[in-house]
Amino acid sequence: MSEVQSYMDFVLPLVLESGKELLTVKNIISEAKNGNDWDVVTIYDRKIENLLIDKIKMKYKDHKFIGEEESAAKNTISTLTDSPTWIIDPIDGTANFVKQMPITCISIGLTINREQVLGLIYNPYMDELFTALRGQGAYLNGNRITTSGETKINKCIFNYELSLAAHDGRLRELYMSRLTALIDVVSGIRSYGSAALGLCYVACGRIDAYQCDGLYPWDAAAGTLIVREAGGYVIDSSGKPFDLMNPNFLATSTETLSQQFMSIERSVDVSRLNINEKTV
Ligand code: IPD
Ligand code: CA
Ligand code: CA
Ligand code: CA
């Protein structure tokens, strides 16, 4: 058994157990993060992240962690190193979770030598487990998945994530300009409120493209690997090389579709916007 497979075997039951616990939760109380009413956190976000970090740390003493809530507590995101690093989003789609909308998941990625090698995303409400190991394909509940293979933008169902980040004004202009340019071209637009599941839905062909800017490593670490392992294509929509630590991503079923999106988006002039300036 490969080393990475053994990591997957260790972490999987922890994630399934944490996910099942979420199903029993009633009357969820949320609090505003950094005083922003649109960015919420619950005790469950912290509880799941702490549990995962504690259990993994106990077993693999030299492993490192980049978690959404520990980063918020430290007010900084640790630098990615060559050490095995677990990148954890304990609840992706917290706003959905608070409303009990079943588009909520736990997302965990692992990097080794700064390469994404493992991705695991579990939506307990649908009992859907998306997994990928680098070079070994992507799976939904153990069955191999592939993207839709769609190559035509006019046939494309596009999840344009109207990200929380757009609330701070920094990204709003970019979002609105792109939306105006794309709305008449694609076949349909969705916005599910979970970056990790949006990526999984591209991977399994439920949608053809997913885009979001100004996100964080924990939003992207598992899902972008799952898309690539499902035969999909992921780029940084700003034109720079994809950077897991500063992810702006366009994930598509095919490279051809990606090129069609980019030729439209390049016509939207956003060069003056600094979309990588962020707070944790
Ligand atoms: C959020 C979700 C959402 C995206 C936000 C993210 P969180 O993550 O992925 O889809 O629009 O920008 O912050 O806070 O629910 O883990
Ligand atoms: Ca959050
Ligand atoms: Ca997230
Ligand atoms: Ca989260």
Image: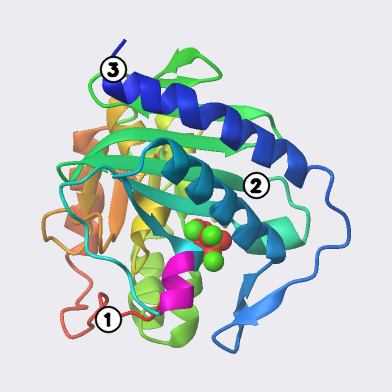
Q: Is residue 129 visible?
A: yes
Of 256 and 222, nearer the camera is: 222
The structure residue drawn at horizontal position 32% and vertical position 19%, both measured from the top left corner, is 137
Judged from the image, the secondary structure of the residue bearing numbered disc 1 is: loop
89 vs 142: above or below:
below
Quarter containing the N terminus: top left
Labels 3 and 2: the sequence-earlier one = 2
> What span is colored magenta in the figure?
70-74
The structure residue drawn at horizontal position 49% and vertical position 44%, both measured from the top left corner, is 107
Q: Pointers 2 and 1 in contact (CB under 8 A)? A: no
User: Mark 1 highlights which residue?
Assistant: 277
Would residue 39 appear left or right of 75 to someone viewing this image?
Answer: right
Judged from the image, the secondary structure of the residue bearing numbered disc 3 is: loop
The structure residue drawn at horizontal position 73% and vertical position 36%, both measured from the top left corner, is 20
Of 135 and 228, nearer the camera is: 135
User: Mark 3 highlights which residue?
Assistant: 136
Of 166 and 116, nearer the camera is: 116
Gap between marks 2 and 1 measured at Cα: 28 Å
Q: How many other residues sit within 10 Å of disc 2, few (<14), some (14-19) or many (≥20)?
A: many
Q: Position of residue 181 (x, y in %)?
A: 34, 65
* Amino acid found under the numbered disc labelled 2: Ile
Labels 1 and 3: the sequence-earlier one = 3
* Amino acid found under the numbered disc labelled 1: Glu
* Amino acid found under the numbered disc labelled 3: Gln
The structure residue drawn at horizontal position 61% and vertical position 29%, both measured from the top left corner, is 128
Would residue 255 appear left or right of 72 to someone viewing this image?
Answer: left
User: Mark 2 highlights which residue?
Assistant: 103
